Amino acid sequence: MATDSSSAQAVPASSGLRGQSAGSTAICTVGKAGVGLTYRGYAIEDLAAHSSFAEVAYLLIYGALPGRAELDAFQQRLKGASSLPKPLEQVLERIPPTSHPMDVLRTGCSMLGVLEPEHTFQEQDRMAERLLAAFPSMLVYWHHFGATGQRIDTESQGDTLAEHYLAMLHQRPPDQEAGHALDVSMILYAEHEFNASTFACRVCAATLSDFYSCITAGIGTLRGPLHGGANEAAMELIRNLKTREEAREDVLGRLGRKEKIMGFGHAVYKISDPRNAINKAWSRRLSEQAPDGYLYEVSDEIEAIMQREKKLFANADFFSATVYHFLGIPTSHFTPLFVLARTAGWAAHIKEQRDNNKLIRPSADYAGPDPRPYVPLDQR
């Protein structure tokens, strides 16, 4: 017997919890008055201009900007935590080179949790530092082994996590500007309040699960194209265009066909994304030395068209695409780089959730059939 849906209530349109508070946090503010981003009270513009990613990660995880001695000790601990255990390297070698790099980080995180489990919550700071340092090594070890069969050294290279990643990726020390550009990008991506992946981490943490499971929940959530991946999609569009004229014709054609242009608009910001201006300035700066520096002009034209035609502003993902491209980073690494940075924010939220925990269990508006009698199988 078919289900009678005539008595079912109308299914409400999903709001995705937009505009609803799901808790309090002292870590980050997003989109106040339609614009603005602060980490523990510090404006993102100031942090990007004057801090390093290590300082920002320390701020998020430990609650205050570090002094010189604290920063030096923190950076030394990160350097010491970059090497991967042999069993983890062996797992990474078994992951097919055609796999999605986000699957690599998700699997690597789970395996590290097996090899170096969190026995008590008193170990959570060490877990946070270990994953911050190990994720770049996991990603690039798998990248090189899958491409060439080369087993690279994952001991710390360079003074920062950005330099470590770039040095492993290109197998040579990065120049100072490249290291600085990626470091700033990691600052911009380090935290963003109750976004989907962070909320997933907090939901997992609220069950009193282990640190690795919470981070894995974040990675799995960020893997979805409605959360991560916008800069990858933007790069796929941008890379095939060479002039402002080509960009104008292509994008207007896409808009005429009702195609979505990734990297524009935001669920929280209503006026502008404060990270965009910083990324755009770096894209322009790096383009001056890039053989395909015209991609900055292409991006600038697309931004102007989207503002004029759709009244949409570029978000953090749009110009980060060309920043990463000019740094020689494979497009498939764009979303994993998000993980490398956001682990700092995820860690801060896991700690905050644990400090004042209550199981996160929202209610749902039922939209199914009214109560009805059960029908035996032979009468259906």
Image: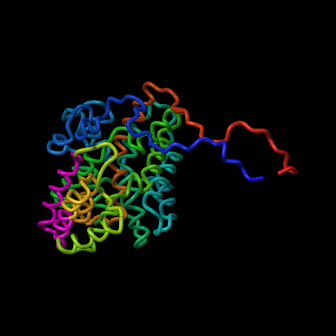
Q: Where does residue 1 sit, x and y in percent of width and height?
A: 78, 52
Q: Is residue 190 above or below residue 283?
A: above
Q: Where does residue 29 sit, x and y in percent of width and height?
A: 29, 35
Looking at this view, is 320 or 182 the one in front?
Answer: 320
Dividing the picture into quarters, in which one does residue 182 lie? bottom left
Dividing the picture into quarters, in which one does residue 250 lie? bottom left
Q: Where does residue 135 sit, x and y in percent of width and height?
A: 39, 52
So how many labels did they put on this image? 0
Residue at 39% over, 65% down:
143
- Could you tell whether 91 is left or right of 64 in the image? right
In the displayed image of the protein, which residue is found farthest to the right?
378
Looking at this view, is 316 or 334 the one in front?
Answer: 316
Is residue 173 visible to us here? Answer: no
Looking at this view, is 289 or 231 the one in front?
Answer: 231
- Tell me the magenta residue range: 272-301
Q: Is residue 339 above or below residue 59?
A: below
Residue at 45% over, 36% down:
202
- Could you tell whether 23 is left or right of 283 in the image? right
Examine the structure image and report whether residue 122 is included in the region drawn in magenta: no
Looking at this view, is 312 or 224 the one in front?
Answer: 312
Q: Is residue 379 above or below residue 125?
A: below
- Could you tell whether 31 is left or right of 131 in the image? left
Residue at 35% over, 54% down:
136
Main SS of the magenta part reads: helix
Q: Where does residue 321 sit, x and y in percent of width and height?
A: 27, 61
